[in-house]
Image (cartoon, rainbow, N blue to C red):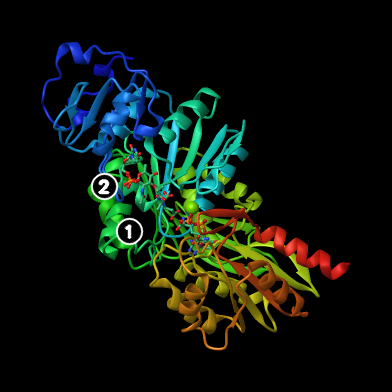
Amino acid sequence: MKLRDLLGQDVLGNDAAIEPAVAALDVSGVALDSRVVKPGDLFFALAGSKTDGARFIDAAVAAGAIAIVGDHAPAACKVPFIAATNPRRALALAAARFFTAQPATIAAVTGTSGKTSVAAFTRQIWERLGHASASIGTIGLVSPKRTVYGSLTTPDPIALHRQLDEIAREGVTHLAFEASSHGLDQYRLDGVHISAGGFTNLSRDHMDYHPTVAHYLAAKLRLFRELIPPGGAAVISADHDCSAEAIDAAKARGLRIMAVGRNGDGAGEGIRLTEAVVEGFAQKLTVEHRGRGYAIRLPLVGEFQIENALVSAGLAIGTGSDAANVFASLEHLEGAKGRLERVGERNGAPIFVDYAHKPDALAKALQALRPYAKRRLVVVFGAGGDRDAGKRPIMGAIAAENADGVIITDDNPRSEKPDAIRAAILAAAKGAREIGDRAAAIRAAIEELEDGDALLIAGKGHETGQIVGGEVLPFSDHEAVAAALASRIA
Ligand SMILES: CC(=O)N[C@H]1[C@@H](OP(=O)(O)OP(=O)(O)OC[C@H]2O[C@@H](n3ccc(=O)[nH]c3=O)[C@H](O)[C@@H]2O)O[C@H](CO)[C@@H](O)[C@@H]1O[C@H](C)C(=O)N[C@@H](C)C(=O)N[C@H](CCC(=O)O)C(=O)O
Ligand SMILES: Nc1ncnc2c1ncn2[C@@H]1O[C@H](COP(=O)(O)OP(=O)(O)OP(=O)(O)O)[C@@H](O)[C@H]1O
Ligand SMILES: N[C@H](CCC[C@H](N)C(=O)O)C(=O)O
Ligand SMILES: [Mg+2]
């Protein structure tokens, strides 16, 4: 591919002409990290949170970069330098031109909680309606041909566009993916042809990255303000304080608004939840769409899963699927791994693994499990190191208030002292116990379960490692529960 095919004025955000000899250069790849540059690559020098890619231009050239894109020219550069107003956005748009194929129908979902679940549900709905479907997010890529683990919720633009191209060539026509606030803020999704966007909710998260809540919300709203073209669908959960702002942002862009939830637009394009009744480990819902009523048995535990299911249904309907078929398919949804997943029981007490690692999610998960605890609701959780420290006491207080037994343990302490993290949670969790070793904490909680109890193990969900220092030690809540239950039988 020629350099001129990747970099136009729209990509670079300026009207500087590229010299014809430079425009005619052959480009064999795009790169954002000097350490993976291959001969023939176009290197994007990005100013980051830890360092500046401009410092690695010489290293990129030594590795074979044929030209550099950045926002400021280095003092000296052995290969052509091309200025871009916003190099991160330029990278994403260039990656979209380099990897040309994308599934025809793409839905993106943002919000503090529920993204992974909505991406998984939307994929399942489409699949049931006969489309070759995939999802990309926190649990990686899930597609008919393969499942690939991914380390970021929204992959970097090169990884993202490479995957879009691969799955489209494998025949995937429908994709649902997660738009994290980091991803939106860092322009990782620009260049993706998004036909519908979902918005679940907003609560405290990532306060180590976003300077203010307004900045955090603005990052999320980029999906509606800038990324979905006018005429696309905006499926917005209507039951939150921030819902009106999200709807206004989408309206201003000329998107088709589909408000869903108890305050949803049942008479029109949206989905209104008119009734929800817990029935064992399922929930019976009545919803209204375009003035017509539908009864649905949602086979999932947790009130918040209703929000996730309705946003997913909206995304499928908003991209052209038949409403009656979509609602019927909700009866077959399977929860994403480690999202209020019932993984076993002891003495008749159900044990759930959940990924709640932020205050609102922990509160919602505990409230969702209350109906299953006639006696004691017990929670085992911790908080990640090198992440927002402010959430620790908040989560401690939420646990003390919403559970009858609280065990504070470790959850990826990373470079921090595990006992200091635990102490910060314990300070606000009256009556909580402390068992640092997560397997031991899970064992202790299971050991004490009696009929009428319910146990929530929160924070790690699908994760398969415990990050201590720089090391990832193999660990899974699922395996820890299985081992504890097996040792009881032995
Ligand atoms: C804080 C953050 O989001 N960082 C992301 C950002 O990195 P950065 O540009 O700030 O990195 P940097 O270390 O300052 O380096 C600047 C530039 O120099 C380059 N460099 C650096 C060293 C070198 O030797 N050579 C070189 O070229 C780097 O490749 C980079 O381009 O851009 C990178 C490329 O897109 C991301 O991989 C990286 O994610 C890091 C690994 C990360 O941990 N991100 C997390 C916080 C994250 O994004 N999480 C969200 C939300 C999770 C959720 O709630 O679900 C996610 O989407 O996963
Ligand atoms: N709609 C919701 N409202 C509130 N809490 C929710 C909702 N959906 C999920 N949760 C809680 O958040 C946890 C994470 O859910 P999920 O993985 O679907 O969200 P996410 O937005 O992808 O999160 P992350 O940003 O951590 O990847 C769940 O395990 C549950 O505790
Ligand atoms: N995407 C989130 C996941 C946190 C999961 C929790 N187990 C933790 O390590 O804090 C993050 O990296 O902040
Ligand atoms: Mg996620």
**Mark 1 C-beta closer than 8 Å to ligand 1:** yes
Q: Nearer the viewer, mark 1 or mark 2?
A: 1
**Which is nearer the eye, 255 or 371?**
371
Residue 269 vs residue 234, the one in the foreground: 234
Q: Nearer the viewer, residue 307 or 62?
A: 62
- Residue 21 sits in quarter: top left
The quadrant of the picture occupied by the N terminus is: top left
- SS at badge 1: loop
Q: Which residue is mark 1?
A: 209
Give the label on residue 92, or none: none
Q: Residue furthest bottom?
A: 431
- Name the residue located 28 percent from the left edge and 32 percent from the top edge: 44
Point out residue 339 in the picture as x, y percentages from the top left corner: 59, 59
Residue 215 location (% of width, % of height): 26, 59
Quarter of the image for residue 229 reads top left
Instruction: Name the quadrant of the C terminus.
Output: bottom right
* Other-residue count near label 2 (Cα within 10 Å), few / some / many at <14 / 14–19 / ≥20: many
First-in-chain label (1 vs 2): 1
Identified by mark 2, the residue type is Arg
- Can residue 429 be seen here? The reply is yes
Q: Relative to 202, say whether 431 is above or below.
A: below
In the shown orientation, is residue 404 left or right of residue 399?
right
Tell me if residue 194 can be seen: no
Which residue, as the protein is rendered here, is positioned at the far right? 490
What's the amino acid at mark 1? Tyr
Please tell me which residue is depicted at 43% across the width and 24% down the height of the picture: 101
Question: Residue 463, image x and y in percent?
Answer: 59, 54
- Give the residue number, with chain letter if any, for mark 2: 225
- Location of residue 389 by image quarter: bottom left
The answer to whether residue 334 is left or right of residue 396 is right
Which residue is at the front of the view, 334 or 85?
85
Residue at (69, 59) in percent of width and height: 478
